[in-house]
Amino acid sequence: MSGDVVNLRMARKRRDRTAKEADAERNRFEHGRSKAERELARARNDKATREHEASRREPGDSGT
């Protein structure tokens, strides 16, 4: 029975550390932008949503 011995305390700390780093990266991206950049991104997302919804087909619409 050979295998690597894993210290669970250290493994948990490593897992928590990587999760915190991922959250920090997400927050840096979200909050580290200027107001103009946020508004531009919001406008682009809204436009993409409108275009997607406009091309949506409803049940009962005939394709011919």
Image (spheres, rainbow, N blue to C red):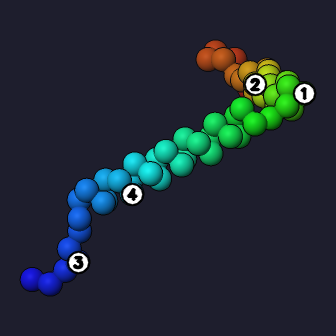
Question: First in sequence: mark 3 or mark 2?
Answer: 3
Amino acid type, label 4? Arg
Q: Mark 1 points at which residue?
A: 36
- Classify mark 4: residues with Cα within 10 Å, few (<14), some (14-19) or many (20+): few
The residue positioned farthest toward the left in the image shown: 1
Residue drawn at (19%, 80%) of the image: 3
Amino acid type, label 1? Ala
Q: Is residue 30 left or right of 2 when viewed as pictured?
A: right
Question: First in sequence: mark 1 or mark 3?
Answer: 3
Question: First in sequence: mark 1 or mark 4?
Answer: 4
Q: Name the residue under label 4.
A: 14
The C terminus lies in quadrant: top right
Q: In which quarter of the image is residue 44?
A: top right
Residue contact between numbered discs 1 and 4, judged by CB atoms under 8 Å: no
- Mark-to-mark CA distance, 2 and 4: 39 Å
In x, y percent, where is residue 25? 62, 45
In x, y percent, where is residue 54? 79, 20
The N terminus lies in quadrant: bottom left
Residue contact between numbered discs 4 and 3, judged by CB atoms under 8 Å: no
Observer-side mark, 4 or 3, equals: 4
Q: What element carries label 4?
A: helix
Q: Mark 3 points at which residue?
A: 4
- Mark-to-mark CA distance, 1 and 3: 51 Å
Q: Is residue 8 above or below residue 57?
A: below
**Residue 16 visible in the shown view:** yes
Q: What element carries label 2?
A: helix
Q: Which of 42 and 32 is in front in this view?
A: 32
Q: Name the residue under label 2.
A: 49
